[in-house]
Image (cartoon, rainbow, N blue to C red):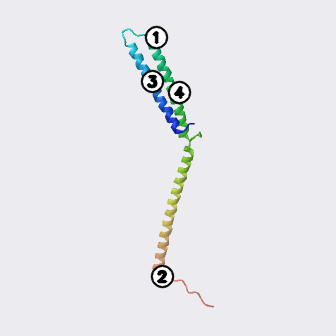
Amino acid sequence: MPPPAEKLQQLEQLEKELANALQAASQTVLELSKEKPSLKQAETFTSTFLKSLETVETGLSQNITYLTQVSTGQAHEGSSYASQKMMQMAWHRLKHSQSRLNDLERLKNKQIQENNALLGQTEIKPEPPQEP
């Protein structure tokens, strides 16, 4: 698939083609609103409108298909979506692990302080080593 700049150019071209279709439609309506319309002229404008509309529809369908592939993570050329998603998930797991480790460290330190406080209240003193 083309890089993003080319995709934008394709969309700009489709926008111009849509403007051409609307111009042809307005010319058709204008021709038919005349007192003596030229059916040949109206048919030409109608044909131009339909051709432009078909081009726009085809181009938009192709772009929608491309965007569907990108958003569902299917492999396609030029996409880094899957890699970015994997990196984002790994980063999230890392942050969660760090947060959990910090919580466990706080709990450990709190438990040590409580144990030290209990030992200090009961004043249990270790026995001195006996000499032989």
Give the foreground label among 2 and 3.
3
Q: Judging from the image, what secondary structure is the residue with disc 4 in?
A: helix
Q: Which residue is mark 1?
A: 40
Q: Are marks 4 and 1 in contact (CB under 8 Å)?
A: no
Whichever of labels 3 and 1 marks the residue nearer the N terminus, that label is: 3
Q: Which residue is mark 4?
A: 58
Q: Which residue is mark 2?
A: 123
Q: Are marks 3 and 1 in contact (CB under 8 Å)?
A: no
Q: Residue 98's spot in the image, x, y percent?
A: 52, 60
Kind of residue at badge 1: Lys
Badge 4 crowding class, 10 Å Cα cut-off, few under 14, some 14 to 19, many 20 or more, is few
Q: Is residue 54 left or right of residue 23?
A: right
Indicate whether 121 appears above or below 65.
below
Asked which quadrant contains residue 130, the reply is bottom right
Q: Which residue is mark 3?
A: 20
Whichever of labels 3 and 4 marks the residue nearer the N terminus, that label is: 3
Q: Judging from the image, what secondary structure is the residue with disc 2 in?
A: loop
Badge 2 crowding class, 10 Å Cα cut-off, few under 14, some 14 to 19, many 20 or more, is few
